């Protein structure tokens, strides 16, 4: 007889952690470039924590470790979809960050993942971790449409 396992009431991802090769450089990136609030630093452990969004909403931990022990990761910062459309590219350009969209088509436009639906653009931190700005879009999920430009999304769905 199969027993049902209790399911925890998970609502969101609270924190993620990255290994970085230079804690000071990464603190400057996440604080000064990305605008996150440094909320805790433990010098003896070579770790810093940043609030994402409002304090206590979500957290990023960065841990200094030897470069050869860094395993590259990916995570996405949720942003307002309209900000991604209008301001994410200027934001990244002003900070000297290279960026690309999921299709890597050499354009200056974020792409829509129709299965969510959400719009996104990618970039790297100083250690090469894959970062993303992603914003949920109104409208129904349309997984059959794949990844597309926002203009195509508007014409096909809205």
Image (cartoon, rainbow, N blue to C red):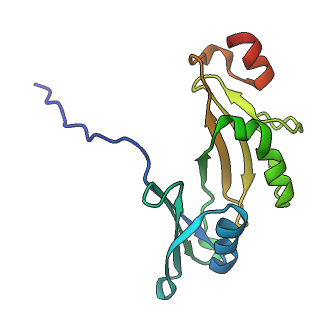
The image quadrant of residue 28 is bottom right
The image quadrant of residue 26 is bottom right
Q: Horizontal and vertical percent for residue 123?
A: 74, 51
Q: Horizontal and vertical percent for residue 32?
A: 70, 69
Relative to 83, 136 lies left or right: left
Q: Residue furthest bottom?
A: 44
Q: Residue furthest right?
A: 106
Position of the N terminus by quadrant = top left
The residue that appears at 82% across and 35% down in the rendered structure is 109
The residue that appears at 26% across and 41% down in the rendered structure is 8
Picture layout, residue 86 above or below residue 145: below
Relative to 151, 119 lies left or right: left
On the question of residue 35 being in view, the answer is yes
Q: Horizontal and vertical percent for residue 122?
A: 73, 46
Picture layout, residue 71 above or below residue 156: below
In the depicted view, which residue is nearer to us: 82 or 134? 82
In the depicted view, which residue is nearer to us: 45 or 5? 45
The residue that appears at 42% across and 44% down in the rendered structure is 12
On the question of residue 100 being in view, the answer is no
């Amino acid at each position: 007889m199969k027993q049902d396992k209790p399911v925890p009431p998970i609502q969101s991802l609270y924190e993620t952690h990255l290994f970085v090769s230079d804690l000071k450089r990464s603190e400057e990136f996440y604080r000064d470039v990305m605008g996150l609030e440094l909320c805790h630093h433990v010098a003896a452990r070579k770790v810093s924590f940043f609030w994402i969004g409002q304090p206590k909403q979500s957290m990023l931990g960065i841990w200094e470790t030897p470069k050869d022990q860094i395993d590259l990761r990916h995570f996405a910062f949720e942003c307002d979809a309209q900000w991604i459309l209008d301001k994410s590219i200027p934001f990244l350009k002003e900070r000297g960050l290279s960026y690309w969209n999921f299709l890597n088509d050499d354009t200056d436009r974020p792409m829509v993942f129709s299965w969510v639906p959400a719009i996104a653009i990618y970039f790297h931190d100083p250690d090469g971790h894959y970062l993303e700005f992603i914003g949920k879009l109104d409208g129904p999920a349309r997984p059959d449409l794949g990844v597309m430009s926002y203009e195509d999304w508007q014409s096909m769905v809205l």
